[in-house]
């Protein structure tokens, strides 16, 4: 059975304790690997190594750091089959999807490498005639990167690449559900020849994660995860006033206007909701349909949702894969049962399947209300609740009546409707006539409880910098 060791200060290290973290294939429930759990002393040593390496890394011209990132992008592409094979087993994804995720991670690495000559400061006019104000952009130092289970390879480089190009070094904690792909990335880091200590990757329990995140040399913590995890990170940040960057929960609303291409919208929404069994932060989580087309659109959704079959994607890639674990499945099923008890109509799905694997069927609920738990709380699974509305203003009000504000979707052919939603939606993103895809040249940032800061693009890269104002008399 596969056994992975932690990677720190440029090499894979021998375990200092007997703690092993079991990794389970969610499609078969079989243990497919073990990884060594880092001790608190190992986590502290990794931060110290990152801090020492950062002194030299920040002094390199950004263009030289970019050379390393381009080499890492090449290595990720070359290692994509091995990274994808590990990711497929630990996540339940198909090998093709998992390998593509590794290739995409190489692409975002290359994208951020190209910021090397575009990290700019400012010259600011002074009120004093014999004085210049110069604002510099500088790295923060050591960044702790906390990676989720759902897209662990792409999110790894989504955080690490901009941190590195800005002059920081990183200590990465992968999810304990999906750590083996992270150690395949470590092999790509070795292959690329990055200086020792610049990238460190350690699997660990929660107590060790706290020791990592509250280390006084950690200047920033970046997380993609739940609201609960975000609150924990904010507690960690308080210890040393570290900078947080949090991408948290989402409950993407999709507004379907009467003039929309209903067939396209239905196909798109079902694809969004069933990709990786709905375990995407921006997957469609609630659907608001104009009353004149409501019944027709629900019928289209039911047709497409009913056609989705679940199973082991290692054997049949066209199937919808599993949820991450049994606890997630039970939580989702409980939400569906409570929605039905509160008056929702089960159109399809909604039943716990028999057999091995953490599977749950694509589930459509109609006759939902705004006050229902299924509308107000994130499911993070293949559940699609539908609410009817009369006017676009009412739809906008319901879409905004929420604790989350990560992403949003509108289907319409009317530019006035599009502009109304674009200027009124309380979310970090709006997708018109398509579902979310997080283009890495954009900015993926949430409002409300969906987070602080953000990822991607220029603004995502600048998250990993701090400023220094130099006031020069002459």
Image (cartoon, rainbow, N blue to C red):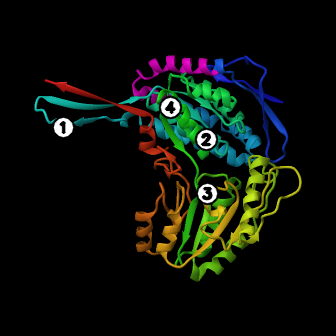
Indicate yes or no whether the magenta region holds residue 249. Answer: no
Q: Earlier in the sequence, mark 1 or mark 2?
A: 1
Q: CA distance from mark 4 to mark 2?
A: 14 Å
Residue lying furthest bottom in this view? 292
Q: Which residues are magenta?
A: 43-69
In the image, which is nearer the foreground, mark 4 or mark 2?
4
Residue 365 x %, y %: 70, 69
Identify the mark at residue 229; answer none if there is no mark: 2
Q: Nearer the viewer, residue 103 or 221?
A: 221
Confirm or deny contact between disc 4 and disc 3 (CB under 8 A). Answer: no
The residue under the point 56% across, 75% down is: 261
10 Å neighbourhood of mark 3: few (<14), some, or many (≥20)?
A: many
List the residue tagged with mark 4. Answer: 238
Q: CA distance from mark 4 to mark 3?
A: 32 Å
Q: Earlier in the sequence, mark 3 or mark 1?
A: 1
Residue 96 x %, y %: 70, 48
Q: CA distance from mark 3 to mark 1?
A: 45 Å
Q: Earlier in the sequence, mark 1 or mark 4?
A: 1
List the residue tagged with mark 1. Answer: 125
Residue 391 x %, y %: 49, 78
Q: CA distance from mark 1 to mark 4?
A: 35 Å
Indicate yes or no whether the magenta region holds residue 60. Answer: yes
Residue lying furthest right in this view? 355
List the residue tagged with mark 3. Answer: 283
Confirm or deny contact between disc 4 and disc 2 (CB under 8 A). Answer: no
Q: What element does badge 2 sit on? A: helix
340 to 145, vertically: above or below: below
In the image, which is nearer the foreground, mark 4 or mark 3?
4
């Amino acid at each position: 059975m596969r056994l992975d060791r932690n990677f720190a200060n440029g090499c894979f290290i021998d375990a200092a304790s007997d703690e092993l973290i079991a990794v389970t294939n969610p499609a078969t429930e079989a243990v497919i690997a073990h990884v060594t759990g880092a001790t608190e002393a190992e986590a502290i040593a990794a931060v110290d190594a990152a801090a020492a390496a950062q002194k030299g890394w920040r002094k390199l011209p950004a263009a030289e750091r970019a050379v390393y990132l381009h080499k890492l992008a090449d290595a990720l592409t070359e290692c994509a089959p091995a990274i994808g094979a590990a990711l497929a087993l630990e996540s339940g994804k198909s090998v093709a999807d998992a390998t593509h995720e590794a290739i995409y991670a190489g692409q975002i690495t290359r994208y951020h490498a190209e910021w090397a000559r575009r990290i700019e400061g400012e010259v600011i006019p002074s009120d004093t005639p014999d004085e210049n104000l110069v604002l510099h952009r500088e790295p923060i130092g050591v960044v702790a990167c906390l990676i989720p289970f759902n897209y662990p390879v792409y999110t790894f480089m989504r955080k690490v690449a901009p941190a590195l190009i800005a002059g920081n070094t990183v200590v990465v904690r992968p999810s304990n559900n999906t750590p083996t792909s992270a150690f395949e990335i470590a092999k790509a880091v070795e292959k690329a020849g990055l200086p020792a200590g610049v990238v460190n990757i350690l699997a660990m329990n929660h107590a060790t994660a706290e020791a990592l995140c509250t280390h006084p040399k950690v200047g920033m913590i970046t997380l993609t995860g739940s609201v609960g995890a975000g609150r924990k990170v904010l507690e960690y940040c308080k210890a040393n006033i570290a900078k947080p960057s949090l991408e948290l929960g989402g409950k993407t609303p999709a507004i379907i206007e009467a003039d929309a291409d209903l067939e396209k919208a239905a196909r798109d929404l079902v694809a969004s909701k069933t990709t990786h069994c709905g375990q995407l932060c921006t997957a469609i989580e609630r659907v608001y349909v104009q009353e004149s087309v409501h019944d027709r659109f629900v019928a289209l959704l039911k047709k497409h949702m009913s056609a989705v079959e679940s199973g082991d994607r290692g054997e049949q890639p066209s199937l919808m894969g599993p949820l991450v674990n049994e606890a997630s499945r039970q939580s989702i099923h409980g939400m569906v049962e409570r929605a039905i008890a509160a008056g929702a109509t089960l159109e399809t799905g909604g039943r716990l399947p028999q057999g091995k694997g953490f599977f749950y069927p694509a589930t459509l609920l109609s006759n939902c209300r705004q006050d229902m738990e299924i509308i107000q709380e994130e499911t993070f699974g293949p559940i699609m609740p539908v609410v009817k509305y009369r006017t676009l203003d009412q739809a906008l009000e319901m879409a905004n009546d929420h604790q989350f504000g990560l992403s949003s979707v509108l289907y319409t052919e009317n530019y006035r409707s599009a502009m109304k939603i674009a200027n009124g939606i309380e979310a970090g993103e709006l997708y018109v006539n398509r579902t979310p895809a997080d283009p890495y040249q954009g900015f993926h940032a949430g409002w409300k409880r969906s987070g602080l800061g953000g990822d991607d693009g220029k603004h995502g890269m600048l998250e990993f910098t701090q400023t220094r104002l130099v006031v020069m008399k002459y």
